[in-house]
Amino acid sequence: MKVIETVDLNVYYKEVHALKNVTMSMNKNSITALMGPSGCGKSTYLRALNRMNDLIEGCKITGQVLIEEEDAYAKGVRVDELRKKVGMVFQKPNPFPMSIFENVAYGLRVNGIRDKKFINNQVEKALSQSALLDEVKDSLKKSAMDLSGGQQQRLCIARALVIEPSVVLMDEPTSALDPISSAKIEELMFSLKKNYTIVIVTHNIQQAARISDNTAFFYIGELIEYGSTKEIFTNPKHKRTQNYITGRFG
Amino acid sequence: MISQTTSGKRKRFNQRLMFWIFRILSLSVVGVLLVILSFIFIKGIGVISWDFLTESPTEGMTSGGIYPAIIGTLWLIAGSMIFAFPIGVLAGIYNQEYATWKPLKNLIRIMTNNLSGIPSIVFGLFGMALFVNKLGFGDSIIAGSLTLGLLVLPVVIRTTEESLAAVDNTFRHASLALGASKWQTTRKVVFPIAFPNVITGLILSIGRVSGETAPILFTVAAYFLPKLPTGIYDQVMALPYHLYVLATSGTDIETARPIAYGTALVLIAIVLIINILANVLRNYFGKKFKVK
């Protein structure tokens, strides 16, 4: 089942045509890696899916983004409802300066949930899904700022999971982390696949090869090649893709 | 061996020279402040006593205390802050977080800057025309507080804006990406992080308000009023104006001179104590919402 589909998606930042006619779709419970050199449009694509681009002044979008077959840009779509469905994890771990518990509970509270028992359950579930529960269960009241970088990033993942999105977008989630923390996050993504559809932007070619089911290669705003990761890495159809994955440019 | 070269010597000499120039200049600023403070302290400490702090002036202000002026100044600080702090903070939040239309944002910013450039005596005249006469408050705490409030409004707005601008956008994005509204994001995430710095605006404002003479001259300050105010429509004495009176138009200026220094010392002490309290508050919130 297609959870995400974009049709002729174009994104403009004022005069800059940042994304050109991107048509692609992602299936349920898959991990899709978006890769390409800096400025290729992969992050722009990611941010179009939960409408974070709306926050950028002068950003214009044409074409269609369908999330679970609903047009994300249709009139009457509430951006906050869309973002509940399409969660996001950012490049730099960015927990709020609150307790570990409150960080995770935040998504529930801002969406009007007051039931204490329900919040406790959801927070615990999200922390266990993000493989953080064992490390923090005795210190939920402590400030999230005291966690290590890798723990903070897993906390941010828990924070995104607590409202039970169907899609989780990850914008270079391990690029600010040490290799061991990165490995933990990669492992985590595997287990999250069971319940979520994941799209990850990565600069790390090995990472894309290791974790993703499908890989998309972007170059200067265009989707050059998209297919199963195995296919892309063993038998790329385009010269550019081949050059990129073999490290000839990047 | 890595030996000394001529160019290396020169480089190190210049480095030392500049370093000492910077050091001397910044120390001289501290020095000036210390000279002023110790001058006031030495000249004023002699008249400070419990009676000086708790009694009214007597014998044409050549003896007695300054109690009514202390109370009056505290009233004016509280009154002007109750007015200016919430309005200034909300205006700052609007301008930094909500105003998306650039021309409007710039207009507000230019106007705010202009407001802070207006001489305080003009605020005094404006306050007299509007609050004292037009709105009929008369010479009163409320007229003086509103006038002082207007005077420091730009300070509060600017510091609020700057404190909010210093909050990393990544926090806003994280909150919005969870389906939070802009208001929830501002109230629960951005403002708490900015709050310790917003308090800086409060501290600056209090310093300004407690020392200003011109704005209260026509709106609230009494030349001599031994009784305490009973409400916001009463006149009060105030420390800066009392100081001005003692130094320029008392009945016997020479005799009153030590009292003038004493008054100045008390004024500085009050501002210092309030600043320390505000700093405690700032550190408390700074620790609570520390970003690492």
Image: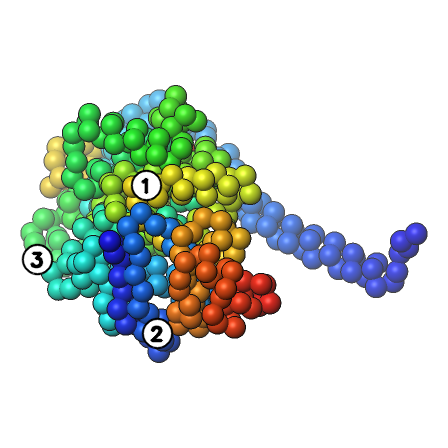
B183 or A66: nearer the viewer = A66
Do marks 1 and 2 both belong to one polypeptide chain?
yes
Q: Which mark is residue A20?
A: 2
Whether residue A205 is visible: yes
As drawn, is A78 to the left or to the right of A42?
left
B273 or A63: nearer the viewer = A63
Q: Nearer the viewer, mark 3 or mark 1?
A: 1
For image coordinates 25% across by 56% down, the residue present is A2
Q: Chain of mark 1?
A: A
Q: Are marks 2 and 3 in contact (CB under 8 Å)?
A: no
Q: Which residue is mark 1?
A: A194
Q: Which residue is mark 3?
A: B134
For image coordinates 46% across by 60% down, the residue present is A231
Neighbour class for label 3 at 10 Å: few (<14), some, many (≥20)? few
Which kind of residue does numbered mark 1 sit on?
Answer: Lys
Residue A69 x, y percent position in the rendering: 18, 58
Residue B35 x, y percent position in the rendering: 55, 43
Instruction: Tell me where residue B247 sits by quadrant.
Output: top left
In 3D space, how far apart are the residues under numbered discs 1 and 2 (Cα atoms)? Answer: 32 Å
Q: Chain of mark 2?
A: A
Q: Nearer the viewer, mark 2 or mark 3?
A: 2
In 3D space, how far apart are the residues under numbered discs 2 and 3 (Cα atoms)? Answer: 63 Å
* Residue at the farthest right position: B1
Which kind of residue does numbered mark 2 sit on?
Answer: Lys
Neighbour class for label 2 at 10 Å: few (<14), some, many (≥20)? some
Which kind of residue does numbered mark 3 sit on?
Answer: Lys
Neighbour class for label 1 at 10 Å: few (<14), some, many (≥20)? few
Q: Chain of mark 3?
A: B
Residue B127 x, y percent position in the rendering: 18, 55
In 3D space, how far apart are the residues under numbered discs 3 and 1 (Cα atoms)? Answer: 72 Å
B110 or B240: nearer the viewer = B110
